[in-house]
Amino acid sequence: MASIGNNSLNAKLVLLGDMGAGKSSLVLRFVKGQFLEFQESTIGAAFFSQTLAVNDATVKFEIWDTAGQERYHSLAPMYYRGAAAAIIVYDISSTESFERAKKWVQELQKQGNPNMVTALAGNKADLEDKRKVSTEEAQTYAQENGLFFMETSAKTATNVNEIFYEIARSMLFLGVLVSFTSTPATGLWCNGQSIWKCNRISHKSSKEELRTE
Amino acid sequence: MASDPTSLPSPSDLSIPNPSPTEEERLATLNLEEPTGNHAPIPRPLSNGSSLSADFDTGNEIEVAEEELLGDSTDLAEGSSSHGGGGWREISEQDGEVASCSPSSSGYAGERGSSGASSGIEEVDDGVALQDDWVPGKRHLDEDDASVSWRKRKKHFFILSHSGKPIYSRYGDEHKLAGFSATLQAIISFVENGGDRVKFVRAGKHQVVFLVKGPIYLVCISCTEEPYEALKGQLELIYGQMLLILTKSVNRCFEKNPKFDMSPLLGGTDVVFSSLIRAFSWNPATFLHAYTCLPLAYSTRQAAGAILQDVADSGVLFAILMCKHKVVSLVGAQKASLHPDDMLLLANFILSSESFRTSESFSPICLPKYNPMAFLYAYVHYLDEDTHLTLLTTSSDAFYHLKECRLRIEAVLVKSNVLAEVQRSMLDGGLHVEDLPVDSSRRSRSISPQMTQENNISGSRPPHMALGGPAGLWHFIYRSIYLDQYVSSEFSSPINNSAQQKRLYRAYQKLFASMHDQGTGPHKTQYRRDRDYVLLCWITQDFELYAAFDPLADKVSAIKTCNRVCQWVRDLENEIFLLGASPFSW
């Protein structure tokens, strides 16, 4: 769970998605700046931590990179329980992985923390010629489900840092909101949807501040 | 399939050595004597009070076999057909066709699969050192049972379900092998329906070994002339590896649905199985059922053990510190005992999965000999390139506690210089037959400094200088029975490439199987000469010694040398074994 103190925030973040979607590649690109063409399957879950500076605050991510294999599915709650943020990853060249991603969204909506900041990442955006999932389709799905959406490429590093920055920003913003209001958590989630949209727009217009109007 | 032997390579001209010593020509006798001590030809200060004697005046006859020309021709052929003898590359077992690139689950094509490179690996320190060169995972995915290349593979392993669904195949795509799997299943159930059990089938030079584990069937088809017991043991380990990943509770899936397709549950584990199968030809732990330690000064190992014990007392079930596949130290919570086979499978799982090297991992695993039904949770972290720490717990939410434990352990290991010592020992290597003390009466009890010095010397010795030990001793393995540990000498010049090493291990395996033969054994000693080696095996209540000599070695001096090896090992036991505080149940 996210906890705030002295302008710094500790946040547990979990990556979920089909095997081979590129969860580990995204994390390794973000944490170590590395990319391996042949990333081996993750066993169980791998733990990383990385600190980001967002404006005058810092966010320390404790990242759980889970294994996508079916046999580990039943363990997922162990990793997403108490998570402040989740990135659900699919591979734009695989409709199967997009369907799997939708299942993860449903599972999180049912089981996850209602305040969780959830992002949908369409990974392998460099494989444009093999694309099976259109940007519009994913964008629409994300909007309907209150997810923050980006297409990423761990290979070319496109949008990798950005997606983590966005999550950090949103969490800081939500954190501020939580500390200013006594809105019940579920209510906040409803607000969260609109906040998300505004937040993204404001991100494009200005990197300096967040606006809700 | 083996039911159609004409399609397989013909039995041809290969002679089949019979592993059973009872049917072998007995050309000489060798005596084993108990330490009555009044006519000992050599000094016998052996702490366990027994000695292998070279004189021929007392009772107990033992098996001696001389196989003059009955060499291990299969293995020889294997070695020569390989590309420069790179036994660590699976390709060396084959005829060298280039594997096609297979698409992997990632969109980026899995070109990892192409392993057709023809350069052999000449030098091998230990099995995992060559991971960079060895291509992990499964190759030849394009093959199926109709491919000539697939049929020519020397050793196949299959896992299938009792309904005949393929679960794993060493070569080829499981899904394309559905028909073949169904045939295997038909053979097994045909025999079962007759109220019997099929153990193995011989078809020409091929041996088909079956192992039935509830709803899971395991089959090995091999023309490597390994004994049945050895192949069955390998199937048992493959089954254990599967349990380590899934637990035995997978059987319940078959109770609910007999046609259950299990293969997706093993997704991404090809590399674990192929690494285990590779270990069958280089890692003696696979047939000795014992583990090996990294040589370290007694105090260094004690320091490592103390901090591991510390965390074990705080709710960790097992704490295992290893350098590659060698144990630095390990500790278990009270009454918890760890079986050497479980350690082998766990180490194989960790070492073969690159994923553990990237960060800290937390994963469910099952130790089949500890409890085949339940998962434990393993925290795995590499402290440096080779040294990895595994903390096992029964609690699924212990990650942060284990992470804390690891930080404490790491701090202590760095501060007490253990990690540096481990690295140094890795570089120095283990026991070198060239260093076998000449006169065992002049040895000293505390040899820690000398040992390090000797090893430094041998480590810097140019490889061509090493021509084996005294009396033509090339290699030995000493297994301490009550410690469940073994120590194996480093390979020296006559056995300096992986094909030769593999051949030697196969010879040891055969020796092991014949010594432990249930029908005629167990035996106490065996002296066997063939065109590759003189092999000498000696089993007592306390230890088993396997030694390989130059085929021209003199028998009397070989026996004397074995006595010296045993003495040497006992002198060094503080450094080469993990003593005391053992978590193993006696």
Image: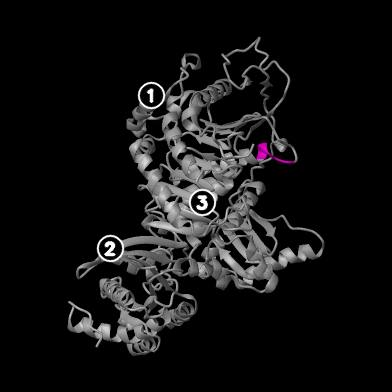
Give the residue type at disc 1: Pro
Residue B164 vs residue B410, the one in the foreground: B410
Does the magenta portion include B516? yes
Give the residue type at disc 3: Leu
Residue B53 vertical position relative to residue A114 in the rendered view, above or below: above
Give the residue type at disc 2: Thr
Instruction: Find numbered disc 3 in the image and state the secondary structure of the residue it sits on.
Output: strand
Distance from the alpha carbon under mark 2 to that under mark 3? 29 Å
Q: Position of residue B512 (x, y in %)?
A: 62, 39
Q: Quadrant of residue B36?
A: top right
Q: Are marks 2 and 3 on the same chain?
A: no
- Residue at point 51% right, 34% down? B578
Q: Earlier in the sequence, mark 3 or mark 1?
A: 3
Instruction: Find numbered disc 2 in the image and state the secondary structure of the residue it sits on.
Output: strand
Residue placed under numbered mark 2 in the picture? A51
**Magenta highlight range:** B514-518
Residue placed under numbered mark 3 in the picture? B392
Q: Position of residue B16 (x, y in %)?
A: 64, 46
Distance from the alpha carbon under mark 1 to that under mark 2? 46 Å
Residue B498 vertical position relative to residue B560 in the rendered view, above or below: below
Neighbours of disc 2 within 10 Å: few (<14), some (14-19), many (20+): some
Q: Chain of mark 1?
A: B
Residue placed under numbered mark 1 in the picture? B449
- Residue at point 32% right, 83% down? A129
Q: Position of residue A62 (x, y in %)?
A: 36, 63
Does the magenta portion include B578? no
Neighbours of disc 3 within 10 Å: few (<14), some (14-19), many (20+): many
Q: Chain of mark 2?
A: A
User: Is there any visible trace of residue B121 in the rendered image?
Assistant: no
Q: Quadrant of residue B28?
A: top right
